[in-house]
Image (tube, helix red, strand yellow):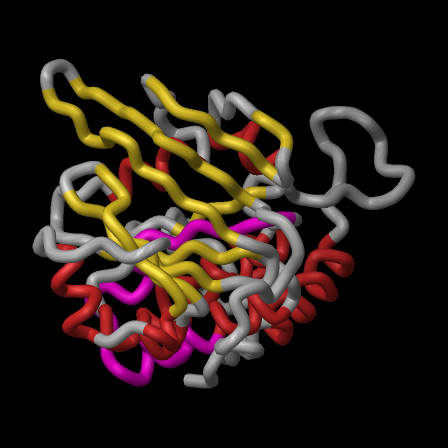
């Protein structure tokens, strides 16, 4: 696993790709988020950490349009937005990598990279039998996997034949391929072994190196302290601290998770 570029810098890019400020989300009488705040710059890896139930996945779902917040402010590139669907977030340049991958196991690597967004051949008849631009798909798919340093036996191989790390790598490559601003990743290495985890983390570093803002939700705090530029800590639905990863230790982060002294995020 490579360290992110300019890890010691507090500002890999200029301005914020995503700002989620004082986000509130209620499910009936349960307040899942009660003032969660997250800011991430282009070219930056931000690790979002906290105990189970802290609100990490809920905050990611608000940002990607999967759920609507009950309060707070969301902005992309400094412009206030009200994201009402995952498709709208994608149109705004934000992609998400889910825990369950959302890949079609019987389709090939190339087909999964373009799933739902397949290109058509130039001049193809605009009818129900329009022909896919398969040559263009293969060329773009090869560039996508190369761009995140992913090695697969073949672009034509069904995803079900790949290792867990390779499958997650395909999901990351797809997000990088389509993202214009940011990628959200919810526990991208859950249940993966060390080698497979390394594949995914190298892909994350490659995504940030391309100028994308990357938010990684993870319970693997030691890895996040090495991988991320900054850490944000959630506790009981609120952002309770964080800071530059280079300035934090594992005890620092655990103390914040348990309700100890706050540090500026």
- Judge left or right: residue 176 versus residue 220: right
Instruction: Please say whether residue 175 is visible from this viewpoint.
Output: no
Name the residue at 73% across, 44% down: 119
Q: Residue lying farthest top?
A: 28
Marker count (numbered): 0
Which quadrant of the figure has residue 22? top left
Which quadrant is home to the N terminus? bottom left
Residue 62 percent coordinates (x, y):
38, 32
- Judge left or right: residue 223 versus residue 12: left
Instruction: Please say whether residue 51 is visible from this viewpoint.
Output: yes
Residue 118 percent coordinates (x, y):
66, 44
Residue 104 percent coordinates (x, y):
41, 50
In front of the other: 2 or 12: 12
Q: Is residue 141 above or below residue 147?
A: above
Q: Residue lying farthest right?
A: 123
Numbered range of the magenta stretch? 181-202
- Judge left or right: residue 49 versus residue 16: left
Is residue 125 on the magenta stretch?
Answer: no
In front of the other: 187 or 54: 54
Is residue 187 on the magenta stretch?
Answer: yes
Name the residue at 56% across, 78% down: 5
Which quadrant of the figure has residue 122? top right
Name the residue at 29% across, 72% down: 248
Name the residue at 32% across, 17% down: 70
Residue 262 percent coordinates (x, y):
22, 54
């Amino acid at each position: 696993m490579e360290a992110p570029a300019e890890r010691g810098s507090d500002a890999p890019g200029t301005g914020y790709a995503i700002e989620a400020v004082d986000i509130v989300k209620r499910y009936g009488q349960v307040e899942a988020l009660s003032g969660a705040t997250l800011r991430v710059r282009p070219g930056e890896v931000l690790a979002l950490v906290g105990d189970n139930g802290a609100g990490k996945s809920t905050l990611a779902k608000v940002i990607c349009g999967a759920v609507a917040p009950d309060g707070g402010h969301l902005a992309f590139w400094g412009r206030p937005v009200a994201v009402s669907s995952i498709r709208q977030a994608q149109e705004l340049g934000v992609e998400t990598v889910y825990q369950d991958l959302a890949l079609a196991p019987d389709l090939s690597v190339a087909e999964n990279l373009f799933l739902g967004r397949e290109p058509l051949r130039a001049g193809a008849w605009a009818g129900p039998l329009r022909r896919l631009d398969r040559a263009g798909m293969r060329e773009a798919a090869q560039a996508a996997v190369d761009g995140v340093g992913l090695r697969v036996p073949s672009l034509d191989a069904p995803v079900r034949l790949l290792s867990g790390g390779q499958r997650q790598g395909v999901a990351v490559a797809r997000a990088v391929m389509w993202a214009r601003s940011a990628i959200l990743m919810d526990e991208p290495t859950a249940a993966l072994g060390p080698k497979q985890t390394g594949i995914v983390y190298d892909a994350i570093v490659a995504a940030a190196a391309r100028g994308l803002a990357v938010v990684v939700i993870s319970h693997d705090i030691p890895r996040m302290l090495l991988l991320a530029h900054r850490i944000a800590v959630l506790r009981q639905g609120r952002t309770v601290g964080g800071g530059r990863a280079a300035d934090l230790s594992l005890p620092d982060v655990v103390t914040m998770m348990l309700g100890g002294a706050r540090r500026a995020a």
